[in-house]
Image (spheres, helix red, strand yellow):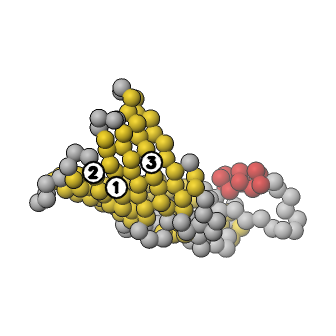
Amino acid sequence: AGSFFVPGLYVGGVLRVIRGRTYFATRSLFGDNRSLDQLARDAFDKNATDTTRVAVDVGVLWKIGPAIRLGAVATSINRPTFLVASDAGGIPLQGPSEVRLPRTVRVGAAVSAPLLGLTVSGDVDLARADTLVPGLESRRLSFGLEKTIALVAVRAGAFRDLAAPDPRWVY
């Protein structure tokens, strides 16, 4: 990251190498007496598929004086995909052939009071993002507080998924 034409403005990027492992399981409603525990073990043992991909992230930070910071980040801009097994121990699977990592864009702000050792921050997703669950989207609103005491920073925070079917605060 580096400051460019505007004092206090920093732009950065990263390439993340991600090793993804996907599993797929099927269960018949009739004649399949496996427990959910055994079903998961069978999926892990019989059809794990490993895929290595690169994800591209970029961010910008603007420091406005000593106490205020504004930022934005876009993650998984290229939306990498991870392969899913096409069969489980010789049994053809009916499901997706790949899982796509969702792209997210967040903006946020932080205000610090150095003399008090206190920082308050908040951020929000600009748009709904797909999740790894088909048909389910996410859009988070987050808040946090940090108090520095000597050399120790104590943090607390909460978020709410605004796109959830039943949004609730999580602390």
Report crowding for label 2: few under 14, some 14 to 19, many 20 or more residues within 10 A (C-alpha): some
Q: Cα distance, mark 2 to mark 3?
A: 15 Å
Q: Residue at x 39, y 50 (%)?
A: 121
Q: Cα distance, mark 3 to mark 1?
A: 10 Å
Q: To which residue does mark 2 refer?
A: 68
Q: Earlier in the sequence, mark 2 or mark 3?
A: 2
Q: Earlier in the sequence, mark 3 or mark 1?
A: 1
User: From what the image shows, is residue 98 above or below residue 160?
Assistant: below
Q: Residue at x 49, y 61 (%)?
A: 140
User: From what the image shows, is residue 131 above or below residue 119?
Assistant: below
Q: Residue at x 44, y 35 (%)?
A: 154
Residue 134's x, y, as percent?
60, 71
Residue at disc 2, secondary structure: strand
What's the amino acid at mark 2? Ile
Report crowding for label 3: few under 14, some 14 to 19, many 20 or more residues within 10 A (C-alpha): some
Residue at disc 3, secondary structure: strand
Q: Cα distance, mark 2 to mark 1?
A: 7 Å
Q: To which residue does mark 1 refer?
A: 109
Q: Which mark is residue 144?
A: 3
